[in-house]
Image: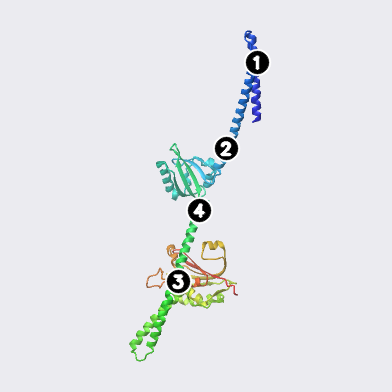
């Protein structure tokens, strides 16, 4: 800048010298014309003042140009490296201007992206939504937005972006300013929150149903005991006719069957009286498997895979019997003709990442008991309700709907977690996590 000012000052000095030379030359040609030395000095002084003013103005202009260049650089950086994508689009979504952030979102260099249509980078299943946005923006000339999935045109396997597209028409009415915001993480959080909320609601519902079932079972059990005691007294009376004895015996059988339902409700509600002991799950399950084959029939093959060095668990062995029998019967009903029931055990360390997916669990060491069948499977809409009492996919004459509810209650009573996974036509898997016993 100073160099330019110096050059400018030399130009003014040369100009002043030429003016003095012209003045002397004019005096020689016109002897009658003359300037006094005072007037000449005054004119030279005025030229010097103007020279200084011009040099100051030149310095200000140069400073303004430098400020403008720096401001342009800052604007370019803010524009290109903004956390959102900026584009200028024509009516048909042709890209007229675009910043670097937007080019990264679609995976194409800026020089190749200009002149392309943004529509081509929208997931084909959501292009209708984007076209509707552009139509509203240019028709109503109001700011609009939509949420679509952006994909890489030449690499469909690359990570795409869930984007919020906001557009507002420019004054010319032929183009619009557009902002692309990456909302992938936001949508993931929203889905995760929704899943956790659904899990919490389901857990609260199951807890409420469990308390209700346990309370009702206790009251019902008390009444059954009174009924059973009186029936037994009547049956012992010898003076009653044989037909009366038969009727009383029938009533007693119904009472005993009702008592069995009460025990299942108590198990679901976690109110079952138990005597937990430290045991090797392999030994207990191996014993049960031998009894399952006759129960399931020859058309179902039972396979048991045990884990070496299995950690001990603390649970009532009779409850394991209940769990295995109920899950086996559930698998039998799911297998139409021939099939396989696979039972396995294992050790697993549950971390925080796993617990974030299964909110009912806490990190730690668990023994897993897995029961898997290759039956008809369960629809996704039904899967969340299978542990509820009397919820069943069978006909009214095929099941009471307490088997899986009993399993759920037993697992909960022993501080465990049961996770069901299934797909229609692809079988069902139950993973039971029981805490590793620390009392061994």
* Residue at 49% from the left image edge and 54% from the top image edge: 187
Q: Position of residue 205 (x, y in %)?
A: 44, 66
**Which callout, 3 or 1, points at the residue further toward the start of the chain?**
1
Q: CA distance from mark 2 to mark 1?
A: 49 Å
Residue behind mark 3: 211
Question: Which quarter shows the C terminus?
Answer: bottom right
Along the viewing direction, whichever of 332 and 229 lies nearer the viewer: 229
| Label 4 element class | helix
Along the viewing direction, whichever of 355 and 117 lies nearer the viewer: 355
Q: Position of residue 395 (x, y in %)?
A: 38, 70
**Which callout, 3 or 2, points at the residue further toward the start of the chain?**
2
Residue 38 numbered mark, or none: 1
Along the viewing direction, whichever of 209 and 422 lies nearer the viewer: 209
| Label 1 element class | helix
Residue 71 numbered mark, or none: 2
Q: CA distance from mark 3 to mark 1?
A: 115 Å
Disc 1: CA contacts within 10 A as few (<14), some (14-19) or many (>=20): few
The correct choice, above or below, for 139 with respect to 349 in the image is above
Q: CA distance from mark 1 to mark 4?
A: 82 Å
**Which callout, 2 or 1, points at the residue further toward the start of the chain?**
1
Observer able to see residue 32? yes
Along the viewing direction, whichever of 98 and 94 lies nearer the viewer: 98
Q: Position of residue 343 (x, y in %)?
A: 51, 71
| Residue 380 located left or right of residue 39 | left
Residue 186 numbered mark, or none: 4
């Amino acid at each position: 800048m100073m160099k330019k000012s110096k050059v400018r000052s030399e130009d003014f000095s040369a100009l002043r010298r030429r003016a003095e030379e012209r003045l002397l030359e004019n005096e020689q040609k016109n002897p009658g014309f003359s300037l006094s030395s005072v007037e000449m000095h005054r004119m030279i002084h005025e030229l010097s003042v103007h020279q200084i003013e011009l040099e100051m103005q030149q310095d200000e202009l140069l400073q303004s140009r430098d400020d403008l260049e720096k401001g342009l650089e800052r604007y370019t950086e803010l524009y290109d490296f903004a956390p959102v994508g900026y584009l200028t689009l024509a009516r048909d979504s042709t890209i007229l201007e675009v910043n670097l952030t937007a080019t990264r979102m679609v995976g194409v260099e800026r020089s190749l992206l200009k002149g392309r249509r943004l529509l081509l980078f929208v997931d084909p299943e959501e292009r209708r939504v984007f076209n509707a946005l552009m139509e509203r923006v240019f028709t109503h000339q109001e700011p609009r937005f939509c949420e679509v999935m952006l994909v890489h045109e030449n690499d469909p396997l690359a990570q795409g972006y869930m984007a919020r597209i906001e557009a507002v028409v420019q004054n010319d009415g032929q183009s619009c300013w557009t902002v692309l915001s990456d909302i992938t993480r936001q949508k993931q959080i929203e889905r995760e929150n929704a899943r956790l909320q659904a899990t919490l609601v389901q857990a609260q519902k199951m807890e409420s149903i469990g308390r209700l079932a346990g309370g009702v079972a206790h009251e019902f059990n008390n009444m059954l005991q009174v009924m059973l005691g009186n029936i037994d007294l009547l049956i012992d009376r010898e003076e009653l006719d044989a037909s009366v004895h038969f009727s009383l015996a029938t009533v007693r059988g119904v009472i005993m069957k009702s008592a069995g339902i009460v025990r299942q409700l108590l198990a679901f509600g976690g109110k079952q009286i138990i005597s937990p002991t430290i045991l090797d799950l392999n030994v207990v399950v191996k014993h049960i498997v031998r009894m399952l084959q006759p129960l399931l029939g020859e058309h179902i093959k039972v396979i048991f895979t045990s884990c070496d060095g299995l950690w001990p668990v603390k649970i009532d062995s009779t409850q394991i019997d209940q769990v295995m029998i109920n899950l086996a019967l559930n698998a039998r009903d799911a297998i139409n003709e021939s099939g396989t029931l696979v039972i396995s055990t294992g050790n697993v360390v549950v971390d925080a990442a796993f617990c974030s997916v299964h909110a009912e669990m806490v990190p730690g060491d668990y023994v897993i008991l897995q029961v898997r069948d290759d039956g008809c499977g369960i629809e996704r809409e039904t899967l969340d309700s299978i542990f509820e009492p009397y919820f069943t996919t069978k006909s009214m004459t095929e099941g009471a709907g307490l088997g899986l509810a009993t399993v759920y209650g037993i697992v909960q009573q022993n501080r465990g977690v049961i996770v069901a996974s299934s797909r229609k036509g692809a079988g069902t898997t139950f993973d039971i996590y029981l805490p590793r016993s620390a009392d061994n």
